[in-house]
Image: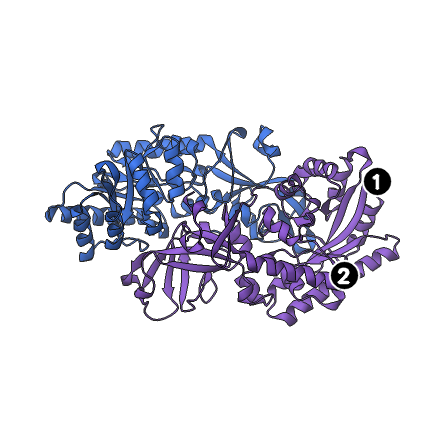
Chain colours: A blue, B purple
């Protein structure tokens, strides 16, 4: 890559995914300090960035206590000295053996289940050296994706079943408040955070009442962990992830300000088409993703410093930019000039890039290579 | 990866992108034979797959005469013995030096321009050893993305300017009929193919009339090259790409039958949620992409053998499946069972995968690793 010798982000070959190290460090410190103050363990999620360097920043250098969404991530971090890894994904039956190997290798590897059948799969593969499977039960507190609905008797039954199974330890109760993504503003976010916290803590109390003591409790999502409610101090852990980069979506939800967004896709103007009142840029969906569906007033991204133009559509390697209204002043955007796109969804954009260019005040200070695959 | 020792695609760790080698070979042969019969050079596009192995199949082993959409692809294929490579992308000014190096290294490296300013950039970097830049002019024949509109005097002026510039050779006129993607059925596809062909050939005639002789002509898109019109025999080249895999989108346009679609994303059922009438599968947008926007009657994909279920939504690593109507019969889809998704857009899905599993009749015969980046 010609880009590796480049010193300033303005000279990078485009499209390029750039990460502002100062903002990343600030986002990490704020979240670490927030939950330290509340006395709650922060277990940061790796899914947004999938890099060692960023994981080190998020864990404050401990290399302990993380959550991942793929086994590829789990293995990647385990291979690089990480431990206490929670694979927060409904246990896929084709991956039990790999999970067992990680459980045997690490001091703490946690899996997640939301069905009795998954528990049977764990029983069929007892761990060596008398180790126990560390199991979190996924509780659905109105998020509506995975998990056992918190109010259903089946939830309590499954938790009891896990706790009674030989070779298996019910380590915790895990809820994802992804429904916080439907919020607008701090008040609505806090309402979801409160609801998820209440249901999770109530569930742990109900477990105690039936004699199951000890399981931890964890909830998480970037909106709820950006605006925690006081009751969250009673949780054992939280597990947000996107906050390390933030994005336009999070700013619209109210999790952050636009100034907290740490990532951009840099692109250059490669075409002037006055007959269409349109610019062409070298950023297609391979560099930005289609996430968000182009529904922002400025289309698929916010174009930094140019609230009056819109990324209206993309093909594989091309993006079309038009004025939000009126006629485009092409002289403002010479061929070869650079535009800086704030992604709608940082997780979706990061995943499109084999390398991230990390900068401090525009000067490149490193490159990060994410792990990929499953 | 645990998957590499796997012999049958049914045993792959999911999600996995699988390529049916027999269909790929058939799609390649049909396209090669079709244009050999018409006496037109096929210059296959590499953007869909970005792998050496598939390129070898598409070029019939010649390793010559390909088109790419990124410089990373150009360098990747050049490094592996490919030559006569057309970088069919409006020349990005930050990549002129890398283009010059490829032009000096290869016997034939072609660039594309659609503005006088781009031509000036080439003039500022004369090639060594008296070599000339091979330049294709991009003509917009109502596709509406890049290129100079075919009927505007500016088009003729630019072509003349290229042909008169020292150190530069006007190698050809290049039109992409991406507007064929709006077609439904063979008749509409052929109408677009005819229009693009007519405008391109007329333009070459106009050039001849002003004394510019010799430039080649090339049009392309998978729909138009799947249903060529007789006049396309008068072109020098065509440059389709997606046809090697095809996809649901192409079947809806009418370029192919569903039986011609060579790729799938394999996924497994990881959750049963009767209270939501919903299955969870281990395929999110990281494995399938959001392309198509979920507007198929079956959502984001066609689920092979199950026309009655729908991939309604995805998050990063999860997909939600519901019946198209009525109540889901969960016994048909046990936890751990595999579903096979036909992607809406093969290019967008392939780009999400660091490795493709290649099979013949379900037996894995190899893995292909695509190049990525720009």
The disc label shown at residue B166, or none = 1
Q: In this orientation, which residue lies closer to the viewer: A85 or A105?
A: A105
Which element carries disc 2, helix, strand or loop? loop
Q: In this orientation, which residue lies closer to the viewer: B27 or A207?
A: B27
Q: Residue B152 location in percent, x, y? A: 77, 57
Q: In this orientation, which residue lies closer to the viewer: A222 or B304?
A: B304
Residue visible at 82% across and 39% down? B167
Q: Chain of mark 1?
A: B
Q: In this orientation, which residue lies closer to the viewer: B71 or B18?
A: B18
The quarter of the rendered structure image containing the C terminus of chain A is top left
Q: Residue B31 location in percent, x, y? A: 66, 61
The quarter of the rendered structure image containing the N terminus of chain A is top right
| Residue A132: quadrant of the picture | top left
Q: Is residue A233 visible?
A: yes
The disc label shown at residue A78, or none = none
Label 2 sits on residue: B39
Q: Residue B248 location in percent, x, y? A: 52, 63
Q: Is residue B314 visible?
A: no
Which of discs 1 and 2 lies nearer the camera? The answer is 2
* Left or right of A48 in this view: B57: right
Dot 1, how many residues are within 10 Å of its Cα: few (below 14), some (14-19), or many (20+)?
few
Measure the alpha-carbon separation of dots 1 and 2. Answer: 32 Å
Which element carries disc 1, helix, strand or loop? loop
Residue visible at 65% across and 67% down? B189
Residue visible at 48% across and 57% down? B264
Badge 1 and badge 2 both on one subunit = yes
Depicted A1 relative to depicted B249: above or below? above
Q: Residue B227 location in percent, x, y? A: 66, 67
* Left or right of A1 in this view: A252: left
| Residue A97: quadrant of the picture | top left
Is there a contact, CB below 8 Å, between mark 1 and mark 2?
no
Residue visible at 32% across and 38% down? A102
């Amino acid at each position: 890559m010609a880009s590796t010798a480049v010193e300033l982000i303005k000279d990078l070959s485009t499209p390029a995914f750039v990460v502002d190290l100062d903002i990343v460090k600030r986002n990490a410190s704020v979240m670490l300090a927030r939950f330290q103050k509340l006395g709650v363990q922060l277990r940061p999620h790796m899914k947004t960035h999938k890099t060692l360097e960023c994981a080190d920043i998020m864990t404050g250098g401990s290399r302990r206590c993380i959550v991942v969404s793929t086994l590829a991530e789990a293995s990647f971090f385990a291979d690089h000295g990480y431990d206490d890894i929670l694979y927060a994904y409904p246990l896929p039956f084709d991956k039990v053996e790999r999970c067992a190997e990680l459980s045997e290798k690490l001091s703490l590897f946690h899996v997640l289940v939301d069905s009795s059948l998954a528990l049977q799969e764990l029983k069929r593969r007892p761990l060596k050296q008398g180790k126990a499977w560390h199991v979190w039960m996924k509780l659905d507190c109105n998020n509506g994706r995975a998990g056992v609905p918190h109010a259903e008797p089946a939830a309590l039954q499954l938790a009891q079943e896990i706790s009674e199974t030989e070779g298996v330890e019910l380590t915790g109760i895990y809820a994802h408040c992804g429904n916080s993504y439907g919020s607008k503003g701090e008040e609505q976010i806090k309402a979801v955070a409160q609801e998820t916290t209440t249901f999770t803590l109530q569930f742990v109390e109900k477990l105690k009442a039936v004699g199951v003591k000890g399981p931890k409790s964890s909830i998480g999502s970037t909106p709820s962990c950006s605006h925690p409610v006081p009751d969250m101090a009673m949780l054992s852990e939280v597990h947000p992830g996107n906050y390390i980069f933030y994005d336009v979506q999070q700013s619209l939800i109210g999790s952050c300000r636009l100034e907290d967004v740490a990532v951009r896709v840099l692109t250059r103007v490669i075409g002037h088409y006055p007959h269409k009142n349109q610019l062409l840029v070298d950023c297609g969906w391979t560099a930005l993703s289609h996430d968000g569906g182009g529904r922002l007033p400025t289309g698929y991204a916010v174009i930094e410093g140019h609230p009056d133009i819109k990324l209206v559509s993309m093909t594989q390697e091309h993006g079309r930019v038009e004025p939000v209204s009126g006629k485009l002043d092409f002289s403002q955007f010479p061929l070869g000039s650079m535009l800086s796109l704030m992604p709608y969804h940082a997780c979706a954009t990061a995943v499109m890039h084999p390398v991230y260019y990390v900068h401090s005040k525009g000067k490149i200070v490193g490159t990060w290579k994410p792990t990929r695959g499953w």
